[in-house]
Each structure stands twice: as structure tokens, then as C-alpha cells.
Amino acid sequence: MTLYPPQVKNIEYQIESLVDKTRRYLLTTLGRTLEEATDQEFYHAFSLALRETIMINWQAAAHTFLKNDVRMLYYISLEHLPGKILSQTITGLQKEELLQKVMMRMKRAYNTILECERDPGLGNGGLGRLASCFLESLATLQYPAQAYGLRYHYGIFEQQLWDGEQVEIPDCWLISENPWQFRRDLRRVSVKFGGHAKAKANVYEEPSYDLENFDEVWVLPYDVPIVGFQTKNPFSVLTLRLWSTKESPRNFHLQRFNAGRLDEAAENTTLTDVLYPSDHHETGKRIRLKQEFLLVSASLQDIIRHYLFTHDNFKAFPDKVRIQINDTHPSLVIPELIRLLTHKYDISWQKACEIAESCTSYTNHTILQEALEEWDTKLMQTQLPRQYEIIERLNANFCTSIRKTYPNDEAKVRRLSIIQDGKVRMAKLAILGSHTINGVAQLHTKILKEDLFREFYDLFPDKFSSITNGITQRRFLLQCNPLLSSWITKRIGDGWITDLSQISKLNAFTHDAADLETFLAIKRRCKENLIDFIQENCKLRDQKGVIVSPPPVIYPDSLFDVQIKRIHEYKRQLMHILHLIMLYQEMKTNPNHERIPRTAIFAGKAAAQYETAKAIIRLIASVAHKVNHDEDVSGHLRILFIENYSVTKAERIIPAAELSEQISTAGMEASGTGNMKLALNGALTIGTEDGANIEMRRAIGDANWPFRFGCTADELAKASYSPQNIAKEHPNIALALETLKNRTFARNDEEHFLFCDLYNRLTQNFDRYHTLLDLPSYYEAQKKVDALYQDPMKWASCAIHNVACMGMFSSDRAIQHYSKDIWRIQPCPIDKDILDHIQNAYGH
Ligand code: 26W
């Protein structure tokens, strides 16, 4: 027998134990032997085995919060994009090497097994991913918190490009059993819709309502464990509680079914079936309103149940409960909490309003008018009669108070009123009913205060605050970029993993030639990895969706120019592709050009109904088709659109990026978070003065932020410009625009029609996105990109400097800021006695 030193023995023991457990689960849960199990089955059994490791801490964390009767934060969000839970768990436990050994011993490929898990696509984009970064930081920093969301059966659609056209395929992410969800039958609640609100008086002789003839829906929660990063304390595990209406047979309306009204019969069973796949566009649909209320009502009942577990009255409620409203989508929390307190728990109207205000705070994530939620009063009255009565009363009181402050100014009352022109304005409700509203970057908050909600800011200046977004460096550097991470750790130690401000120590490594070369070599390896991934996974489809050709050959020496985000006019993918058209024409007309070789990589989904965004994808694909097949530019220009952008795809692309496109119209991108992820992985930003770009530039310094361009938000507010004149003054722009009309890229009449429409939008006298106005300075900034890229050592030095200045863009910093200034919560590490107790009773 071999004798191991103690530590090795311990590792050997852990490996053997996991191997054993995995085999056991394969047999006892899946009914398969290791030899015959598919990778999917192996993934399942392996996850069940690993899951055992976190259950003790999960229970211990929950018990610790209860025992200490701490103030809890509840983060309510209609969207969550956690990425793969297995990989998150592995990173949190810091068991990657060990688990690789386990898989090796069991003859499975580590990456292939990790790929078996489908991303939970329970969100559209930035807002959902931010919620997940926040929850990971809350877990790592050991705050007492829980998140709520909906367990959509169909998450965000899978995007395929059929000969350049976006096709949406349903995302059945639950098709194979998911080992990371725990159905909690005991925590089931009921939610009521519709009916008639019958007025009665509460104990204070105030109006209250009983509901008659309502529809009742049973809602069941599924808990997903979110593992925090293991530090000197035992790691914490927080809960993401996802509600589902699917599983309760009582939701099905037999009478309606028998009467032949099939849709109506199934409506309440199907409420959590689909995520609304649109961002920045309000849909105003009845099912969406029902989803929002479902989330709010179920979560509030759960929060109150949890509170009443250790209290027998509501005195301490405003001290113990904090609820964060992620955009206005869950803002019905305010009337529903007031309703529950006044109706069910006999609290006075005045007191209930105070409690609701103390407990809730609201984050705004967009200033685009078309994304601001408003609900038809009729619809709300029909679906949520009691909540509507409360909103009306809140509004009546509010209007009275405005009249007191501003007598004889009915126009002002109308502008501030929550109910306006037959619509309930949800952002106003959220501002009025909560104690704080925050923007997600400094410029964004400034616009909220000075423009969008100016009159509310006049009334409640203390309610407004600004907390710049952040990202978790654990997923978006440590986990996704092991090469760069280990170089950084070698240079500055591993403190950055839990304290990103320490990354500034990298500044000492921006000069030494050996360091710069190492950095360049790492970037090159990451680019090669992405090339391998693309060759394997990004084959092209024909008009019927059949894979017909390999992706183009990509050269690792070319600049990887990356724009990955939802497709939206304000994000200006159109400006990016116009620039690529300009480059293409330049290369074609001048064979002696000195432009650097470039590979432009796009990824992102367009909302299914957003025709212009879909036309932009079409244009990118058509330009790509022509350019990638043109011998004249081969080796110099490649354009790729990677299908089906997701958290996992982001993790693949980001490490390889060299140029990060953050080119939104100034004032329109609330913050952006992809900008932070890319910079942290050593990409340089070409960007406008928008969202968090501004703060990134300030943190990094102008000297190392060379590709700033475009008008500022203030300049745009005053700008008037003529697209015609811009075209006249810049012949290369005029030529590029011409190609949209003259069938250079259009491959059929439909494309020709779509591209002409894009042309018209760009050249209209008022393009809200100011694309052509910024294009000349974008072009100049891209020339600077070329120049710097020709000096790799300088580029590397600048890039390392960028990474070193990303300290403040960690979601840890954002969460600490929210915790200190908005939620006033304290970390609550797992109680060692509780942990010991559970470990002794259940551990091995
Ligand atoms: C009701 C339809 C709808 C759905 C989602 C409207 C608006 C949204 C979101 C608020 C849009 C969104 O995701 N906003 C993004 O939030 C990120 C996190 O704060 C920011 O970084 C992005 O700039 C912002 O666009």
C-alpha cells in the first residue's frame, strides 16, 4: 500500500469518495452502470454527488440567519441568468483540479460533462445577469439574503441564424431532469386573480376589501443553491427561489375545459411557461401582468411566513425585512404589501404605507421611454381589483399632498400622478412607495434626477442615489479565463479573487518586456481556444436551418474586435457594421492599404418582434457572407456572428477579445456590464461617453483609454445635424451607405428591402440614435486602434493597465455599497456551532 503525506491522502480520499458517490447515484437514481451511462447521465449523477458537499452549508446558512434574527435582504427579479450552476458550484468550492481528477479516473472529459448542463436562460440580458452577479457576491460576502424569480419552462429562446435570418427555437431547458433544483412542496402558496373587490372596513374603520369570485392559483417554489466563494470562513450558500404554476393540478379549470374554453382552462397552469423575450420594450400583455403579480404575491407571502417564524407581531418587520425591486417589474410589491398588512394583519393604512416604504427600494435600469412599464387601469382593475384600489388611494393621497405644496398647478399634479391617461405608471409607483431609487451608473442617475424623474427628484431629493453596476470576477475572470487568472495570481497573489481592488497591483507589471510578452502569449492562447470553439460549434446554416458549411478560417494574428450584447438600435451594431463595410471598401479599392487584419465578432439576440434589430442581424450576416468569401481581403477581414449568445457563450468569447465595442448613443445605455467583463479580461474599449464607460475611463485614465469617441449626452441634447451633409463631407461614409441600397450585400429582394429600410432610418433627418453623427469620430478612433495594434508591446501595456484599474467594477463593491447605504444589512457568516451540529448529524 502506498503511504501518502496527510494532505495528499486527504485529496485521494476526496477523489475516491466522489467517484464512489457518483457510481452509487448512477446505479440507484439513474439505474445505469458507469460503463453504459451517457455523458448526460454521468453529469446528473456527478452533480448529485457534488451536491452533497453543499447541503450542510446551505442548511447551516439558513439556520444561522434564523437564529440571529438578522435583517434579511430579498432580491425580487423577473429575470435571472445564473449561468451553469455546476460550474458556479465548482468555482465556489475551489475544487476544479480535484474534480478534473475524479472525471479522469472515471474516464469522462471534464469540459464535455460541464457542457451537459443547459444554461438557465431565465432572463433577457443585462438586468438578469446583474441579479445573478449580485446574488453570487451576496453569497461570497456572506450576507443574509434570498432571491426570488419565476421558473419559466421556456427560457429565452434559442437563436439560430438560417442563412442570416434569426429564427427563434423554444428553449426547453428542463427537458432533462435538473439536479440543481429542489422542489419545496411545503412552501406552496396560493395567489388570487380577478374577482370582485367587495368593500368592507378594517378594525380602524378604514376601507378594506374582500375578494369574491376570484381565480386561485397554486404556486410551488423550486430552490436553486447559489454557492459563495470559500474564504477563511465556511462558504455560504444562498437560495434562488423560483416559483412555478405548472405542478398544481388544481390550477386547471375543469369547468372551463368542459365548456370548450381550452385556453382559459389552462391559463393559470401555464402562467410560468414562458419568459417574455423582450428587453427595452414594454409589452402590456395580460399574462405578463399576471406573472409580475404572481412573483410579487408568492414572494411576499414567503417573506412574511419567514418573518413570522420568529416573531408574533409586525413591530420588527420594517427592521428585519429589505426588499429590492429589480426594475419596476416587481413594483406591485408596494400595493400588495400594504394590502396584506392592512387586510390580513390589521395594521392601519398609515402604518402599512410607512412599513412598505421602509422595506422597499427600487433600481431603475433604463431610461428609454418605450421600456417604462405602464398598465392599463381597466386591465389592472379586472385582474387585480384590490391592488388597484390601493394604488388609486395611494395616488389620491399623493395628489392631495402635491396640491398642498403647489396650489393651482393642476398640470404638475397631472404630470406627477401615478395614474395618467388611463394607465398606471409603474416607475412613479415604485418611486413614491419605496425609500430609495437608484440608477446604475453616475450618468444614468444624473439623467434620472435631471430629466426622466426631475419633478420627483424635486419632491424627494433624498430618495435618489447612484450605485454603479459591477460584475463578479469569480465567474468572469477566475472561472472563464484560467490562463490569465493564474498569471495574475502568480504576479500579485490571489487576494483579487475576493477583493478586486487588489488588482491594482498589476500596475507594477505594465513595463517589463517579459510580462508584456507573457500577457500577449496568454491572449493568443485564448484566441486560439475561441477559434477551436468556433470551428467546432459555429457552422453555418442554410435557409432551412440545415448546417451546410464550416465557419470561415480565422487568423489568430488578427485583432479580435468584439460586440456581444442584445441587438438594439441604441447599442448601434449598425454603426459597427457600417465601419466594417468602410474597411472592406478601403481594402478592396487600395490593395496597398495598411489596415491591420481584423476579425469582427458579433453575438446577441434580437427581440422576436423587433424587426429593425432582426434586419441588422441580417445585414451583418450578409456583409459577413460577402467579405468572408472575397479572396481580395482574405487574411485581412473576417466577420462572424456567433449564434445564441448566453452566459456560457460569453465565458468563451470574452477571454479572447482584444477590442471591446461599447458604442451606444450617449445617454442611452444605463450602465452596461459587458464593458467591465471585457476590460477585466484585457480588452481595450472603443467607446462612447455613456453608462459605466465614463467611470471606467476615469478609473483607467485618459492616457490608457485611447479610443474614446462620439458626442456626449449633453452635446447630443443640443445637436442638430444633417445626415446628408455628413455623407457629403465623408465620401467613404457615402459609399458605405450606398451599399445598403445598391444590392452590394443583399442576396435577394427581401434583403434588399430590409437594407433600404435601414438606409432610410440612418439618413432620416432625425435618427434618434445619431448613428451618422458619431460615425466619423468612430472611424477615426478605429484608425487609432489600428495604429496601436501595430505596436503589440504598447497595446499589451495599455491592456494590463486597463485590467489593473478594474478594481471598483466588482459586484462585491456594488453589493457592499447597497448593503451599507440602502439595505443597511450586515454580513452574517455561518455559525460554527450550527455547522458542527448539522455536520455531526448528517456529515460523513
Ligand atoms: C418590460 C420590458 C423590459 C424588460 C427588461 C423593459 C426593460 C428591461 C430591462 C430594464 C432592460 C435591461 O436589461 N437594462 C439593462 O440593465 C443593465 C443592468 O443594470 C444595464 O447594465 C444596461 O445598461 C441596461 O440596458
Image: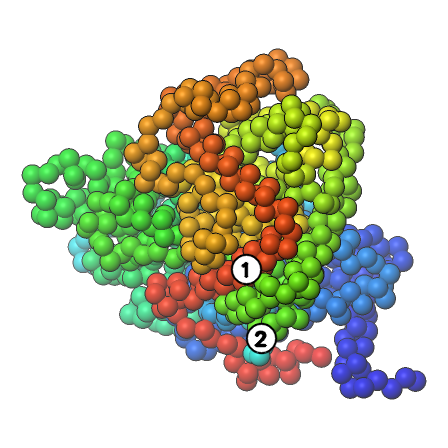
The percent position of residue 373, horizontal first and vertical second, equals: 37, 39
Q: Amino acid at mark 2?
A: Thr
Name the quadrant containing residue 34: bottom right
Q: Which quadrant: the C terminus?
A: bottom right
Residue at 10% x, 48% y is: 405
The percent position of residue 559, horizontal first and vertical second, equals: 65, 43
The numbered mark at residue 231 is 2
Q: Nearer the viewer, mark 2 or mark 1?
A: 1
Which residue has dot 1 on it? 801
Disc 2: residue Cβ within 8 A of ligand 1's nearest atom: no
Residue at 51% x, 25% y is: 733
Cα separation between marks 2 and 1: 27 Å
The percent position of residue 579, horizontal first and vertical second, equals: 56, 31
Residue at 81% x, 86% y is: 5
Eyeballing the image, is 291 above or below 85? above
Q: Amino acid at mark 1?
A: His
The percent position of residue 198, horizontal first and vertical second, equals: 27, 43
Q: Is residue 223 visible?
A: no
Q: Residue furthest front?
A: 592
Query: Regarding mark 2 in the picture, which secondary structure is present there?
Result: loop
- For label 1, count other residues whose C-alpha is less than 10 Å away and answer few (under 14), some (14-19) or many (20+): many
Q: Are marks 2 and 1 in contact (CB under 8 Å)?
A: no
Q: Residue furthest left?
A: 408
Disc on the earlier residue, 2 or 1 = 2
